[in-house]
Image (tube, helix red, strand yellow):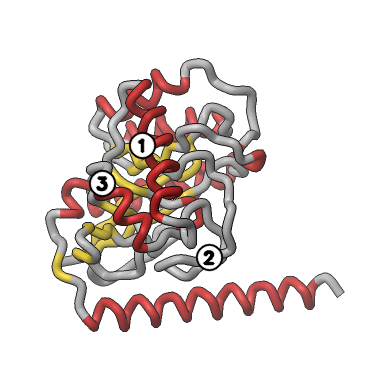
Amino acid sequence: MSARFIVRFDDLCPTMNWVVWDQIETILARYNVSPILAVVPENRDPYLMVAEPNPNFWNRVRDWQSKGWTIGLHGWQHCYTTFDAGLIGIKAHSEFAGLPLEVQEEKIRNGLNVFEAQNVRADIWVAPGHSFDQNTLLALKKNDIHVVSDGYFLKPVNRYGMIWLPQQLWRFRNKPFGIWTVCYHHNAWGQQELAEFEKDIRSFQTRIISTSAGITDSHSYAWTDRLLSRSYLLTLQSLRFLSSVKAALASH
């Protein structure tokens, strides 16, 4: 079977870039795309405060969920408090990884309380900074969340009693097989990024699937998944290192 793709947007909160988001939402609807939307329940991260708070935010979230779009619990306040890279290993900053189970449970419960007060259901877990650990997973399971959007696998896997829907790309790329989640952060977008996004959505439209379609194809975590994940992580780290070296050389 040819590769299939899932679209994910992170950092949705009342103070996000609404001018750009409204155009993104129009594109998603135009091409009948059902994305994962990672919502920050109670944002305290100043980097996500790029616009005046939208008083209609939670009405919008409820509307997205009513359309069948997947709402992700994106942490609690999106504030990094540890330098632990967690199970994924890509970013050594976390709101959760490295903290005691009871602290993580409290944070997740706080986030879910906000969702519940707004009549919003958390369909999936999306960790800020891709950083979480086994205690995070235990806390999630205690709160009836059983799907994670993360990991460098070719297809969804069952690991630590959770379904992991892999997230491996930050823009669409041609792939021969597998299920690939493409993650976007739209706050700094302009018209060029919007045009590129719509072009990609149009090109890949027939291969874009929903979260529910993706998780039906899960399998038990195996040594091949571990090998692929480590190889992919090393590749990402190498590319980031080369990019930083190139930037440093260009500045001199």
Question: Label 2 near label 3: C-beta < 8 Å?
Answer: no
Question: Label 1 near label 2: C-beta < 8 Å?
Answer: no
Q: Where's residue 117, x and y in %?
A: 36, 21
Q: Earlier in the sequence, mark 1 or mark 3?
A: 1
Name the disc covering residue 142, or none. Answer: 3
- Tag 3: residue type? Lys
Q: In this rendering, would 216 be left or right of 239?
A: left
- Tag 2: residue type? Asp
Q: Residue at 55%, 80% (x, y): give it.
A: 238
Question: Label 3 near label 1: C-beta < 8 Å?
Answer: no
Q: Earlier in the sequence, mark 3 or mark 2?
A: 2
Q: Where's residue 47, x and y in %?
A: 65, 42
Question: Dot 2 surroundings within 10 Å: few (below 14), some, or many (20 or more)?
Answer: many
Question: How far apart are the two marked residues, 1 and 3, measured between alpha carbons?
Answer: 33 Å
Secondary structure at badge 3 equals helix
Q: Earlier in the sequence, mark 2 or mark 1?
A: 1
Front residue of 50 and 99: 99
- Corner quadrant of residue 83: bottom right
Secondary structure at badge 2 equals loop
Q: Residue at 20%, 78% (x, y): give it.
A: 222
Q: Where's residue 95, x and y in %?
A: 52, 51
From the image, tell me which residue sits under label 2: 84
From the image, tell me which residue sits under label 1: 28
